[in-house]
Amino acid sequence: MHEVKRKKAQSIASKKDSVKPIVSKYDERERNRSNDFLHKLTTELAKAFPSAMHGFEDLNKAGMYSKSKRYNRNISKQNWKGIIWLMRYKANVRLVDPRYTSSTCPMCGGKLIKLRKGRVLKCKKCGLELNRQLYGAINVYLKMCGFPPSPSTFY
């Protein structure tokens, strides 16, 4: 609801200076809500897994932008570093190199091919078929623990 009001105020603020304080008020509310959610999320994760090591990809936004305006806006709004920063003082965190986490098979190290509109991926070598998010999560975990892709570590 307040996002619609903010959008209207933002379009008017380009013409009227008197509306700019209202836009800044909505900006601050949005930031506060986002920070509150991140604090609650990281606290619950730390409570649910108190002695676990939490692995995160060390993502760099600068290399992720493309020519699509909508995609660039979505990337710029993400606060991955904020989540990592909040988790660091609540639990053990290890950053992982994000290269090839979603394009290699965790079982054999082979290249993945897309099936059914990119949601499901299949390995060219061993034929393992999983959801792309699951492939990424398994690869991040294996990298975090220092294991190479092999059937013995996968199972």
Image (tube, rainbow, N blue to C red):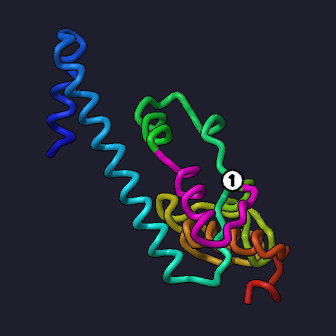
In screen coordinates, is 58 left or right of 47?
right
Along the line of sight, which residue is nearer the eye, 136 or 18? 18
Question: How far across and how far down the image is residue 146, in percent?
Answer: 83, 73
The quadrant where residue 69 appears: top left
Q: Residue at x 64, y 81 (%)?
A: 52
- Residue 49, relative to residue 137: is it above or below? below
Question: In the rendering, at what x and y percent does residue 107 appear?
Answer: 76, 78
Answer few, some or many: residues within 10 Å of disc 1's Cα (few below 14, many 20 plus, some between 14 and 19).
some
In the rendered image, residue 96 lying in the magenta stretch gets the answer yes
Residue 20: x and y in percent read 24, 20
- Name the kind of residue labelled 1 in the image: Asp
Image point 64% across, 84% down: which residue?
A: 51
> Which residue, given by chain and number where applicable, does mark 1 sit on?
58
* Relative image position of residue 2 (x, y in whole percent): 17, 42
Q: Residue furthest front?
A: 89
Q: Quadrant of the C terminus?
A: bottom right
In the rendered picture of this protein, how many numbered marks are placed on residues? 1
Magenta span covers which residues?
Answer: 78-97
> Considering only vertical position in the picture, is 86 above or below 6?
below
Residue name at image x 67 percent, y 67 percent: 93
